[in-house]
Amino acid sequence: RGFRDAGAGLVAFVAIGASIATFGEAESDATWLVLLLAAMVALLCAVTSAGLFSSRTPRRWIGWVALALATSGLWRRLVDDRVESVEPWVLPLSGALLLIALLIWRANCESRAATPIVLVALLTSILPVAAVGFAGGNERTLAVVAASGVLLLAGTLPLAAGRLRPFADAAALAGAIGVIVAGIGRAAAQWLGGDSSFAVDAWLVATLMVLVIAGFGLARDRSDSFSGQRMSAAELIASVALTALLVISGALVAAPSSGPPSAPADTGSIRAIGLCALFCALYLLGFLLDRAPFTRRITWLALGFAVVSLLVGATSGELDPIELGSAPIAIALLAAGAVRLAAVAEARSWPWLGPGVVMLLVPSLLATIGDRPIWRLVAIGVVGIAVMIVGALRRLQAPLLIASIVVLVHVVATFLPQIRAAYEFLPWWLWLAGGGIVLIVLAARYEKRARDLRVLAERVGALR
C-alpha cells in the first residue's frame, strides 16, 4: 500500500509542478487537469482492501475529497470554455453518484452512508443548472423549479417507509434547496438587473406556495425518530421563503427601478399593498392552524414582516393613504384576538384586542397631523365611536379605553381652532369665573363625585 500511495503522490507532484510552471497562460492553463489528477490520487488513497463502498476504515472519507476535486476540475474547465449548456456534463455525474449510492446501500445494507451521496448527487445537477439559468431565459429556471418541486413534494409523501425513508428525506431536502435557489435566485437576478415588473414577485410567490404545500407534508405526524427534525426543517424553509419575499419585494417598494416600459405606473403601491396583505393572511392562517409549517414562530414572523412592510411602504410614499396598510394588519389582529377570546374564557382584551385597536385608530390619528382630508376626520370619529360601543356592549376594557382616548384626542385636535377662537373672543375674566364656579360645585359635592369616580373605576376594572 505504501508503494501505491507513493506512486500516486509522484504523479500528482509532477502534474502540480507542470501546472504551476504554465499557470496564467491562456492556451496552456491545466488547472482543471491538475484538479482531476488530484482527485484520482485522493480516490486511490481512499480505496482499501475491502474496496471503497464496503470500507470501514477512516480512509473512505478521502473519497469525498476526491469527489470535491473532480467536481472542481470539471467546473473549472466549463468556466474556462464558457460552456452554457451544462446539462450534458452534470446529469451523467449525478447518475454516476446515484449508482455509487446504490452500490454502497447494497454493500452495507443501511442508508447512513448512502443518503448523503444521494443528496450530493441531486444537488450536483440542480444547483449548476439553476445558477446558469439566472442570466438566461425563464425556460431553464422553470425546468429546475418543476423538477425540484417534484422531488420536494414526492419526498414529503408518506409512501416511503422503513429503509427508504432517509432517501425520501434527502430528495425532499434537495428539492427544497433547488426551489429556493432557482426561484429566489431568479427573482434576485431580475431585481439586480433593474427589472421592477411583477415577474419578480411572481417567482417569489410561486416559490413560497410550493414550499408551503411541501411544508405540510414535512410536518406530518410520523412515528419515527426524525419527525422533529422534519418539523424544524419545515419551519426553517418557511422562514427563508418569507425573509426572501420581504427583502426583495420590500426593496422594490422602497427603491423601485425604472422597469420595463410596459410596467404600470403604480407598481410600488400595488406591491406594497399586496405584500402587507399577504403577510397578514399568513399570520391569520398560522394563528388559526397552529401547526407546522405555520408554527407560532412563523406566525409572529409573518406579523412582524407585515409591520415592516407597512413602515417601508409608508416611508417610501407607496402606501398613501396609510390605511391601505394599517387596516389589513388591524383586521388580522382583531380577528385573531376575537378567536382567542371566544376560545379561552380567562383571556383578557388588552393583549388580544389592544394591539389591533391601536393599529386601527392610531396610525390614522397620527396621519391627521400632516394630512387632514374630510373622509379621514369623519372615519376616525365614526370608527372610534363604533369601537367604544362594541367595547361597552361586549364588556371589553381595551377597546373601550383606547377608543375613548383616541376619540377625545381627535375631537380636541379637530376642533382646536374653534376652541381657540372662542377663547380669544370672550374676556379672560369670564373664563376665570367659569373655572371658579366649576371648582366650587365640585368641592361642594366632593364626596359624591369621588364615590362616583371609584364606582366608575371599579366598573371599568371589572371589564374583560
Image (tube, rainbow, N blue to C red):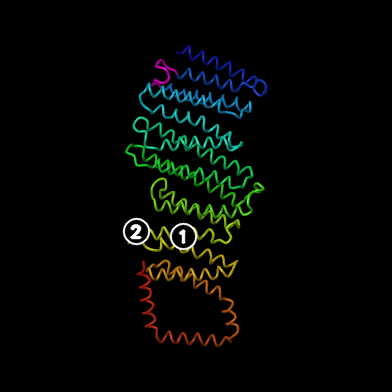
> How far from the left and from the top, in percent, is residue 56?
38, 21
* Residues at marks 1 and 2 touching, judged by CB atoms closer than 8 Å: no
Callout 2 crowding tier (Cα within 10 Å): few <14, some 14–19, many ≥20: few
Query: For the point 48% across and 15% down, which residue is it?
Result: 5
* Residue 55 inside the magenta-drawn segment: yes
* Residue 28 inside the magenta-drawn segment: no
> How far from the left and from the top, in percent, is residue 340?
37, 58
Q: Between disc 1 and disc 2, whose residue precedes?
A: 1
> How far from the left and from the top, in percent, is residue 43?
48, 19
Residue farthest top in this picture: 3
Q: Amino acid at mark 1?
A: Ile
Q: Which residues are magenta?
A: 47-57
403, above or below 126, in the image: below
46, above or below 393, in the image: above
Query: For the point 43% across and 22% down, which residue is it?
Result: 60
Q: Nearer the viewer, residue 348 or 393?
A: 393
> How far from the left and from the top, in percent, is residue 70?
53, 23
Disc 1 designates what residue? 331
Report, in whole angstroms, how far the alpha carbon at label 1 lies from the one at label 2: 18 Å
Residue 343 - label: 2
Identify the secondary structure beneath mark 1: helix
Callout 1 crowding tier (Cα within 10 Å): few <14, some 14–19, many ≥20: some
Q: Amino acid at mark 2?
A: Ala
Q: Main secondary structure of the magenta part?
A: loop
Residue 356 image-quadrant placement: bottom left
Q: Is residue 223 left or right of residue 236?
A: left
